[in-house]
Image: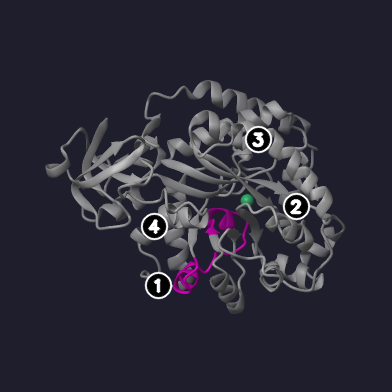
Amino acid sequence: MTEVLSADWVLPVEGEPIRDGAVAIADGRIAAVGPAAELGSGTRYEGAVIVPGLVNAHTHLEYAVYGGFGDGQPFDRWLATHIERKALLEPDDILAIARLGALECLASGVTTVGDASYAGAAARAADELGLRATVYLEVFRADPESALERFEALRAEVGPHLSERVRLGVSPHAPYTTSLEVYAACAGLGLPQMSHLAETVTERAWLVSGAGAWRAFGDRLLPPSGTTGIRALGKRGLLGPAFAAVHCVDLEHDEVELLAASGAGVVHCPRSNGYLGCGTAPVRALLDAGVPVGLGTDSPNSAVDFDLFAELRACVLAARARERDPAALTAGEALELATLGGAHVLGRADEIGSLVPGKRADLAIVELADTGLHPWEDPASAAVLAGSPDRVRATLVGGEVRYEKGKVEWRKARSAAADARRRMLAGASAAPPG
Ligand SMILES: [Zn+2]
């Protein structure tokens, strides 16, 4: 059966915006995209734009209620606060938090996440709530044997929740917590990989020479390797199209070239990077070099929430501020990063990221009639500059409505996650560590 949705505008991302556009859906896939005059109006959304389902290319669903923890602390102490509080949770708490995170993503028009998962609960939450996901199970440490042991234990736990929609990946955490040998072992698994790289200048200083602010807690890190994560991985041939490098704020020119030559993707997380005082990634340079770039919120511990519309605006502002150029990134380019760009980085661009026939029917309907950007001048600008979770009317994953405004019972999801946050606050040391 074919179902048609129509709105004032359809933004296919691949292809020009369509005024009075419609999307036809059959068997969970996009059957056709075009003018409503040709496809019929079907279910009509007035004052709205239909966009491809947003791709939040870097999340930690399991940290959905960590907002504000360690606010204002330097990166090392912020991370120590995070680790201390996380250790206070039981598996049921972590699952409750991940469920809320998945729901908040759907409510933000997000249909796919690239989630770095510490406990594997993100896979179950995505499975239950109908969110599309690649769940990258996190590994740490120096020794490949123990890292893979951890990975296989988590893989066995998430196994029942994997499917065509919820896929498996592996996330060697970062070059200061994970040895090059562990990165190599992860690459050997033949799965998509995701890692935090080049997040701060202090990371570079530590890795290259053991210098800088991280000396104070160097006993909790792997010893300096003498080079940056990207250079070390590039030299060993461990970067590639299946590799998603998250952050990439502190890049030198040769590192941009290494990423481009390898085919690795970058996930840009401007709010997290701003919140933690890291700076902001050279998005324009990465795009000009041909690096696939996606957009991610990272966790609410640094971005406050999973609102990808807020991230879109931060993305536009950060790029223009960095380059001191209003043309550094258009709203349309930002929307592409948050859809097709993210799909490329997650290795799923053949099935999601744009509204073209044959792809999965992942889309969001965003109502903008009550905003100052309506009536329409540029629908992409309106969606990026005025979109918000409050204005998402519905989110469809594979043609199924997985979120509809006013129809979600938030209370239960919120209270279970809030209980977990209460437990973390009750058990935390009086003075944050550090
Ligand atoms: Zn992260």
Mark 1 secondary-structure assignment? loop
Judging by the rendered image, the residue that carries numbered circle 1 is 325
Identify the element where label 4 is drawn: helix
* Residue under numbered circle 4: 336
C-alpha span from label 1 to label 3: 45 Å
Q: Residue furthest bottom?
A: 254
State the residue position of label 2: 77
Q: Residues within 10 Å of mark 1 (few under 14, many from 20)?
A: few
The mark nearer the N terminus, 2 or 4, is 2
Q: Label 3 amino acid?
A: Val
| 184 in magenta | no
- Tell me the distance, in whole angstroms, between the alpha carbons under discs 1 and 4: 19 Å
Badge 3 element: helix
Q: Which mark is residue 158?
A: 3
Q: Earlier in the sequence, mark 3 or mark 2?
A: 2
Along the viewing direction, whichever of 74 and 185 lies nearer the viewer: 185
- First to last magenta residue range: 267-291
Neighbour class for label 4 at 10 Å: few (<14), some, many (≥20)?
many
Work out whether 420 lies above or below 62: above
- Give the spatial CA distance, label 3 vs label 2: 31 Å
* Image position, residue 102 (x, y; %): 53, 35
**Distance of label 2 from label 4 (alpha carbons):** 35 Å
Tag 2 secondary structure:
helix
Q: Residue furthest left?
A: 37
Label 1–label 4 contact, CB within 8 A: no
Please tell me which of labels 4 and 3 falls first in the chain: 3
Which residue of the protein is positioned furthest toward the right in this rendering?
Answer: 219
Residue appearing at x 64%, y 62% in the figure: 199
Which of 165 and 69 lies nearest the eye of the viewer?
165
